[in-house]
Amino acid sequence: MVREAPAAYRITDLAEDERPRERLEKNGPEALSKAELLAILLRVGVTGKNSVQLGQQILDELGGLPGIQKASFAQVCNIHGVGPAKAAQIKAAIELGIRLKKENPDLPNAINSPEDAAELVRYDMEGLIQENLWVLLLDTRNRKIGIEKVYVGSLNASMVRVGELFRGALQRSAAAIILAHNHPSGDATPSPEDVALTRAVVEAGKLLDVDVLDHLVIGNNCFVSMKEKGLGFA
């Protein structure tokens, strides 16, 4: 006799006050797990999995929220049970979160600490799958003038043209710059190449009369200030 495998419980099988949407309405989004929040976006699951279980599967397969941010649309779409419509909803929600953080009025106008500088770039840089080097341009009061996205690819002090890192600063009369680059591995530990590049940029800044205030290495949910660590700064 062949027995049918028991079907996974459905969201509608839960008591009403245990369902993600109802719990969000009653207790707020902070009361829900990441899988439950994804379940609200997904709305329905697939055969054998309800939407919460599918949400957990997405987190597991892609490596959590940072993994979802880094994943391409096709990678999200190809997870069994997701498809184009659900993938679009998930990627749109992630992007709204990033934009909200960038438009946060509480972000400081002036850069007074490595944390201030990191807040301007980390939510974009954490999601990049290739190494990028950006330059924050600051005025005489350490206020942001702009952000120049200068390099994409492996950063090697011998390959990076230091003069290019100052081009935007000289064109826009910036008084100071802060370098920022990401480690796609998620480990923000500076490499020997990072230190060598920083040292070269600091020396060039002295000649060009542009202060190099810091070099930030961005990892997953973390960053390192090379200035604070004394790496590449005399």
Image (cartoon, helix red, strand yellow):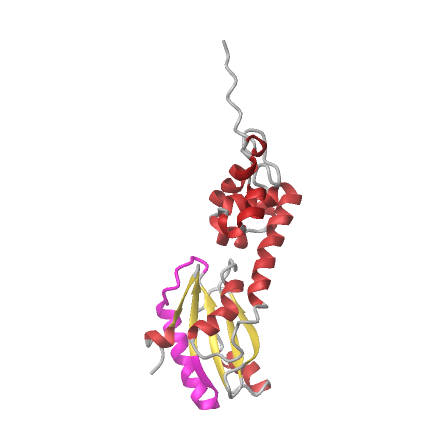
Asked if residue 207 lies in the magenta stretch, the reply is yes
Asked if residue 40 lies in the magenta stretch, the reply is no
Where residue 78 sits: x, y (%)?
59, 41
Where residue 97 sits: x, y (%)?
57, 58
Where residue 40 sits: x, y (%)?
59, 44
Q: Is residue 73 visible?
A: yes
Where residue 11 sits: x, y (%)?
57, 34
Residue plotted at (60% across, 58% down):
96
Residue plotted at (60% across, 42% down):
42
Which range is magenta?
184-213
From what the image shows, is residue 164 above or below residue 71? below
Closest to the observer: 230 or 97? 97
Classify residue 232 by image quadrant.
Answer: bottom left
From what the image shows, is residue 87 above or below residue 125? above
What is the total number of numbered labels drawn onto the structure image? Answer: 0
Q: Is residue 159 visible?
A: no
Residue plotted at (52% across, 28% down):
8
